[in-house]
Amino acid sequence: MTSTILCRTTRQNHQILVYIIRNSSSSSTQTSTRWKRLAYQLGGGLLTAGTLGYAWAHSQAVHASGNKAHLVPLPWSFNGPFDSLDHASVRRGFEVYKQVCAACHSMKFLAYRHLVGVTHTEAEVKAIAAQDQITDGPDDQGNMFQRPGKLTDYMPSPYPNDKAAKAGNGGALPPDLSLITLGREDGCNYIFNLLTGYQDQPAGVKGEPGLHYNPYFSGGWIAMAKQLYDDQIEYSDGTKATESQLAKDVTEFLKWSAERDHDDRKKLAIKAVLIFVPLVVLSYHWKRVKWASLKSRKIAFYRPKPKGD
């Protein structure tokens, strides 16, 4: 239905009639505009899909030409957008790190206080920290000294410096594990596959002395020997310590150490979605109502006929 508003103005003895006609565009023009818009949308979607497909295929070709085996993806408990870390597994992973990994690898960005309320109680963490000797000082005589650890201390390194670490590991420097899952591509799957992927070297393949064959490591040869075995440690909660269980738990612990805000970040995302989705719907409706009359009107100016006619 077409509505018309007639406005009469006088300027220099000339009368001008202003007609404001809303919803006056023809159905054929509207249909043509809709088809053009749909064509643009389909073309943009096809172009985007083609670009992403080419990029994915190119990345797969690059990986296929690499010098290590493809990682086996695992169904981690934290993979989903609404899934959290398994904190029981994180606690067991800390036990694996303390009893196995801490002999060579440091975690210089992880403090004892970070464990409180996540894997252990405050009393438990204080007892764990007190078992470690921390270098502190200088004292009144200017000498460094050893003291039991406390909550504010960071995890001690097994070696005083990098040169000592290399000397104790045949020239290889054990990496710090604080952010290891972020520092490796597909970090969690990489760590699990690496820890459980040690094999006898294939026939005809000759390695170097002091190295161990692992197809999931770049080049296939790694200085670290196999570290995890069935029943290697005893979990405090009684879980059976198989090799795969040990690897899974320590990987989950390293995931938490690299992203301690993982669970809080997902909780915040859920709150943001619940708040902003209704706001977006309301904003869209308000925009349609506010601009409907302005975007669909047509203004026409006509010179009025002389009064004598």
Image: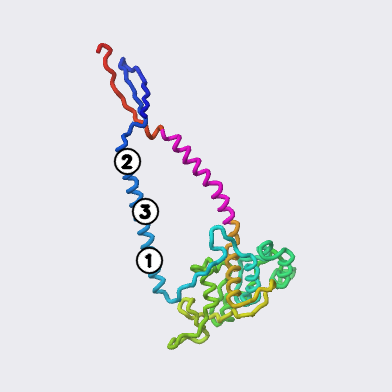
Farthest residue to the left: give it. Answer: 309
Which residue position is annotated with label 2? 31
The rendered magenta stretch, by its main secondary structure, is classed as: helix
Using the numbered discs, state the Cα–Cα distance from disc 1 to disc 3 in whole angstroms.
18 Å
Q: Is residue 161 in sight in this rendering?
A: no
Residue 53 in percent (x, y) is at 37, 62
Which amino acid lies under the numbered mark 3 shown in the image of this protein?
Gly
Residue reaching furthest to the bottom? 204
Callout 2: SS: helix
* Marked residue nearer the N-terminal end (3 or 2): 2
Range drawn in magenta: 265-292
Tag 1–tag 3 contact (CB < 8 Å) = no
Residue sitting farthest toward the top: 308
Residue 214, position as x, y percentages in the image = 50, 80
- Residue 121 is left or right of residue 27, and the answer is right
In reply to whether residue 284 is colored magenta, the answer given is yes
* Mark seen at residue 57: 1
